[in-house]
Amino acid sequence: MILFRYLARELAGAMFAVTIVLLMILMSGRLIQQLAAAAAGEVSLEIVFFTLLLRLPSFLEMILPLALFISILLTYGRLYAESEMTVLTATGFSNFKLLGYTLMPAAMVTLVVASFTLVLSPWGAQKMEALYQKQARLTEFELLVPGRFQSTKSGTRVTYTKALSDDKTQMNGVFIADGDTLLLAESGTQYVSDDTGSRFLELHGGRRFDLNADSLELQILDFDLYGVKIADEPEERRKLRKEAVPTLDLIGSKDPKHQAQLQWRISLILMVPIVTLIAFPLSKVNPRQGRFARLFPAIVLFMVYISLLIAMTGMIEKRTLKPEIGLWSLHIVYLFIATGLLLGPEWLRRQRVKRL
């Protein structure tokens, strides 16, 4: 137990440090994106830090497997480089017993990742989706000032309103110039389509003027109700809507997007023990090589793993990969790689002994 506590403490310390560094990198990049979106008027500045907090589980479910992988490489690499592993082996401590000690912390990490990917991340995505829907109804109007002509976003559309309600959801006395089209309306309200996530402006009681620049012909259309698309749903929002689906709703679904999302969530859980089995043999280094000798190729192997998972998830969504094959095939391949790394050196040693 003394040895187990020592190894667990070393792994926990390294994993904590790696997790903090990776988390700061991800959150700083995310913060920059959110601040840029707030500056562009896409989201309110007040919710920027709140959305970062809601995204924390989804960050950690990606970071923890990598942090565990790196911590095993660094911790055991140091033990090999400083000949501590040599001493343990000389006292009769087998590699498989050490692997068993390693799998215990890995099991705890697996449970934490499972709680994040199956429960907390979808819950956070649901809260963010509700928050973004509320912001989508307000953001476009929040930038408007009654009695002033204002250009929105790309500058292709100019909007004027005589009056704006206190909650900034309804315009009165509306004028919109969009290219060669002019719109006049008594009032306007905004809504977000539940099906597409696109934002529309509903104009009530107005007139539309279309000017043909080539012939100078003017077309006039009177309307009682007219819809103007303000913006399509951002790519991030479409991804967020998939992540917000509860795990229980994904089970048994025939929708390829739901099947891909379910396999992705389960894959993050399966990844933890698999990368542990891969990191353990890769951490073995010669004392002359140093503890970082195999760090770079090991990280490349991990990045190929996660990149293929992402690519194959997209293939399932697009129906180019059968869900029955899905991500399970990749896990099996990496499990074979782990088995080869664990048992291969001993098998080769026995083959050399037989030749002698």
Image (cartoon, rainbow, N blue to C red):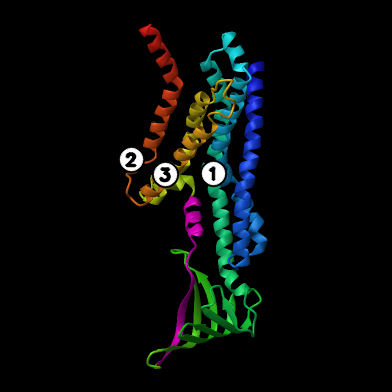
Q: Relative to residue 242, is residue 331 depicted above or below? A: above
How crowded pointer 1 is (Cα within 10 Å; few <14, some 14-19, many 20+) is rated as: some
**Highlighted magenta segment, given as a residue range:** 218-245
| Contact? badges 3 and 2 (CB < 8 Å) | no
Q: Earlier in the sequence, mark 3 or mark 1?
A: 1
Badge 3 is on which residue?
251
Q: Is residue 344 left or right of residue 77?
A: left
Please give the label number shown on residue 87.
Answer: none
- Which part of the image, by quadrant, shows the N terminus? top right
- Which part of the image, by quadrant, shows the C terminus? top left
Quarter of the view holding residue 351: top left
Residue 238 painted magenta: yes
The residue positioned 40% from the left and 8% from the top of the image is 353
Q: Amino acid at mark 1?
A: Val
Disc 1/disc 2 C-alpha distance (Å): 24 Å
For mark 3, give the secondary structure: loop
Residue 192 painted magenta: no
Badge 1 is on which residue?
119
Please give the label number shown on residue 324.
Answer: 2
